[in-house]
Image (cartoon, rainbow, N blue to C red):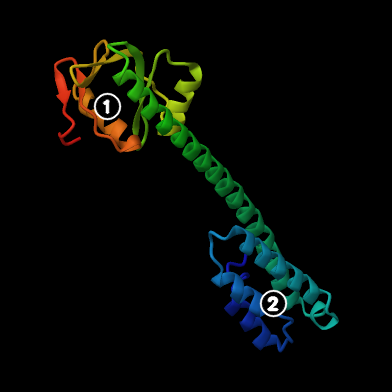
Amino acid sequence: MNTNALTENGWKAVIAKHRIKDNGLQRALADYQRSDEDDHAEQLKGIAKINQLAAALQRNKDIAGNEAVADYLDDVQEAADAEQREIAKAKMTAGKAEAEAEKREKAEDAYEAKLTVTLNKLKSSNGASYEFMFCDGPDDCAVIVAPTISAQQKQQLMQVTGGKRLSKVGSCRFEDGKYVFSLEHAPSGLARKLQAAIANFTGRKLPIMVGPEAADADAES
């Protein structure tokens, strides 16, 4: 495939060499080269215009008799068709990513509101014990606290973090001014990890205790 087929300079050289009257293809190629690669709609519009103008030139009687120019225009259309397919794929991928980001944002909003309410209820529950789970994702860690954790809440936890591995179910209660989390075989540093996870989504740095480990409200997370 001609690598210059979709460049302004490539077509400009052909015009000069064969003394062809341009129909706007040069301008269309220039505009396409300057277009924003992330603006897929504009790129698709530009590539369609290039294809249209190249096809129109091929129907020109003077150009139809010039094999070199006709071959070059074939290259332009072939390159435009290939580029159109690539842009369409990129647009679809970007659309899926945008939809996934929007879905995650909604999940985070719902998660944050629910977590704040639940922690407040637990604090005023006179020693009641709730369940908790946490999940590590590529960027975030998050924790679910609920009287009984549902399958929907587990799914929400994975959506919020982008992670797939959930911890085992542990218990949580409010005692002596701290949120006390209990988990069999709790990993070292879990108190600070849970504190940071809660603070990340709620903005509240709560006093956390996991076994003998404590993360006070005024400690660095």
Q: Judge whether residue 103 can be spotted in this image.
A: yes
Q: Please state the horizontal and vertical placement of residue 134, each as a whole percent of the image.
A: 35, 23
In the rendered image, residue 172, in percent from the top left (x then y), is placed at 29, 15
Q: For mark 1, what is the residue?
A: 194
Residue 85: horizontal and vertical position, in percent? 65, 54
Q: Is residue 157 above or below residue 16?
A: above
Please give left or right for residue 216 compared with residue 203 in the image.
left
Residue 60 x/y as whole percent:
83, 79
Q: Between residue 157 and residue 87, name the one nearer to us.
A: 157
> Given the image, on which type of amino acid does mark 1 rest?
Leu
Numbered badge on residue 130: none
Q: Residue at x 56, y 68 (%)?
A: 35
Q: Could you say which disc has been placed on residue 25 in the image? A: 2
Dot 2 crowding, Cα within 10 Å, few <14, some 14–19, many 20+: many
Q: Residues within 10 Å of mark 1 (few under 14, many from 20)?
A: many
Q: Nearer the viewer, residue 73 or 197?
A: 197
Residue 162 in view, yes or no? no
Between 18 and 165, the one lying in front of the other is 165
